[in-house]
Image (tube, rainbow, N blue to C red):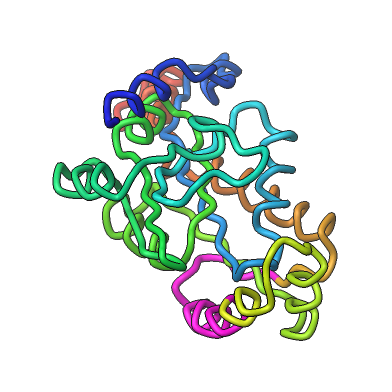
Amino acid sequence: MTSKIQDSIAAAPRRRSSTEADPHGLRRRGVLFVLSSPSGAGKSTIARKLLADDPSLEMSVSATTRSPRPGEVDGKDYHFVDLATFKDMVSDNQFLEWAHVFDHRYGTPRAAVEEMLSEGRDVLFDIDWQGAQQLHQIAGGDVVRVFILPPSMIELERRLRGRATDADDVIDRRMARAQGEIAHWDGYDYVLVNDDADSCFTKVRTILQAERLKRSRQTGLIGFIRKLGNMEI
């Protein structure tokens, strides 16, 4: 099963690299861009809008032990694996991060993300606070963490019920979990309130664009400056 995951990662179509439009050879390291929120607060919607808007951004595809939902495709939405395979991957240190959520396990395969990062490609993560914390501990300055809050808990529950995909007891569990997730807001670099999806998306896109331009990510900047004036830096 692990080889199946690796094969599907290798066969996935590549989006345009961030370095392809770099006429000055400045080069940069990629950004590991994390979106987190309680279920129903809008992170998945914003993630889809980011991917549609930005051809150089790629989604990190997690492995999970839960069953596919209607319309989900193995290798595109998730890598669906059994519990034994997931445990083997944990033992083999194949995950950058993993977490146990609502009776299922989710994890980010390490190899694909490290390859994209080294090539200057940006990777989008739709993960919870536990995953964001683990990822930051491992990847440090490559990680940018954005937490999205609902405008109110009443509105959050209204959105969850409006999706009509979960039973009442599941919604109750999601609401209870939301309180714990929101308590970790201070572990993020940016915190936004999603009271309007389009406005929140614009702010998230602006954060990503600004983070890409940080001097610390411009690995070719010193060489470029040397060439400008034959200067020794």
Tell me: residue 88, above or below residue 8.
Answer: below
Indicate the quadrant containing the C terminus: top left, top right, bottom left or bottom right: top left
Q: Is residue 175 left or right of residue 126?
A: right
Instruction: Depth check: give the residue in front, 55 or 65.
Output: 65
Q: Position of residue 191 (x, y in %)?
A: 61, 70
Residue at position x 40%, y 43% in the image: 63
Q: Is residue 54 left or right of residue 60?
A: right
Q: Main secondary structure of the magenta part?
A: helix
Q: What residue range appears in magenta?
A: 174-192
Q: Position of residue 22 (x, y in %)?
A: 56, 19
Q: Does residue 98 show up magenta in the picture? A: no
Q: Does residue 188 show up magenta in the picture? A: yes
Q: Is residue 170 left or right of residue 41?
A: left
Q: Position of residue 71 (x, y in %)?
A: 67, 38
Residue at position x 69%, y 48% in the image: 205
Q: Position of residue 209 (x, y in %)?
A: 63, 43
Tell me: residue 41, above or below residue 121.
Answer: below
Residue at position x 56%, y 61% in the image: 146
Residue at the farthest left position: 91
Find residue 220 and report its image quarter: top left
Indicate the quadrant containing the N terminus: top left, top right, bottom left or bottom right: top left
Residue at position x 69%, y 67% in the image: 40
Q: Count of labels shown?
A: 0
Tell me: residue 29, above or below residue 209.
Answer: above
